């Protein structure tokens, strides 16, 4: 009986840590705390975008790559993440979340209201793989209707 309780507590702790890492991701990104956001990832952490438009990165790997990718986000968007819902998973280190953003593209003043589904793998409370399912058309419309505008917003140049 003690082993079952201990295993259950361990599973609950892993799940809580994984979900907290995700909540921190939303908080740090929306408040422009980019170094703290990068620190949420493992050294070899991966960020993937299955629906990325042409010219936009489909994958970023490692803390340096993550920093270079996201460092300009606060210069382009002001967002608030809302309506967070976690789906229970068998693997407590796996987070599946649905949420929305409500915000503005700073260069155009246009709304950036996005719906997301994220699949996030964690190890030891750090994000090891983040698959971001979002609609790139929303980003393009917010930044000026041209896919090149969105690509440029996340360019390392």
Image (spheres, rainbow, N blue to C red):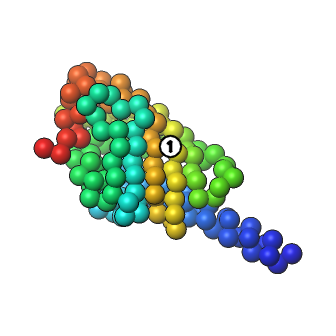
Q: Up-down: is 52 above or below 40?
A: above
Q: Nearer the viewer, residue 63 or 144?
A: 63
State which quarter of the image contains the C terminus: top left
In this orientation, does residue 129 appear?
Answer: yes
Badge count: 1
Seen in the image, is 119 located left or right of residue 146?
right
As helix, strand or loop, the secondary structure at mark 1 comes to: strand
Q: Give the labeled residue for mark 1.
A: 118
**Residue at (26% x, 58% y) in the render:** 64
For label 1, count other residues whose C-alpha is less than 10 Å away and answer few (under 14), some (14-19) or many (20+). some
The outermost residue toward the left is 157
Q: Is residue 74 visible?
A: no
Across and down, in percent, residue 106 comes to 22, 37
Residue at the extreme top of the image, as rendered: 145
The structure residue drawn at horizontal position 67% and vertical position 64%, both measured from the top left corner, is 12
Residue at 29 percent across and 27 percent down: it is 54
Residue pictured at 28% horizontal, 34% vertical: 56
Question: Image quadrant of residue 40?
Answer: bottom left
Residue 7: percent from the left, percent from the top? 74, 70
The quadrant in which residue 38 appears is bottom left
From what the image shows, is residue 48 above or below residue 115? Answer: below
């Amino acid at each position: 009986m003690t082993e079952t309780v201990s295993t259950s507590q361990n599973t609950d702790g892993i799940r809580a840590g994984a979900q907290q890492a995700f909540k921190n991701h939303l908080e740090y990104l929306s408040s422009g705390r980019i170094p703290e956001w990068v620190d949420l990832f493992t050294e070899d952490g991966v960020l993937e975008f299955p629906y990325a438009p042409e010219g936009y990165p489909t994958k970023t790997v490692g803390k340096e790559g993550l920093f270079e990718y996201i460092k300009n986000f606060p210069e382009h968007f002001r967002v608030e993440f809302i309506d967070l819902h976690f789906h229970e998973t068998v693997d407590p280190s796996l987070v599946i979340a649905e949420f929305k953003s409500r915000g503005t593209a700073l260069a155009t003043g246009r709304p950036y209201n996005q719906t997301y589904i994220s699949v996030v793998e964690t190890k030891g409370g750090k994000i090891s793989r983040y698959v971001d399912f979002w609609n790139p058309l929303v980003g393009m419309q917010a930044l000026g209707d041209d896919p090149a505008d969105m690509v440029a917003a996340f360019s390392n140049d």
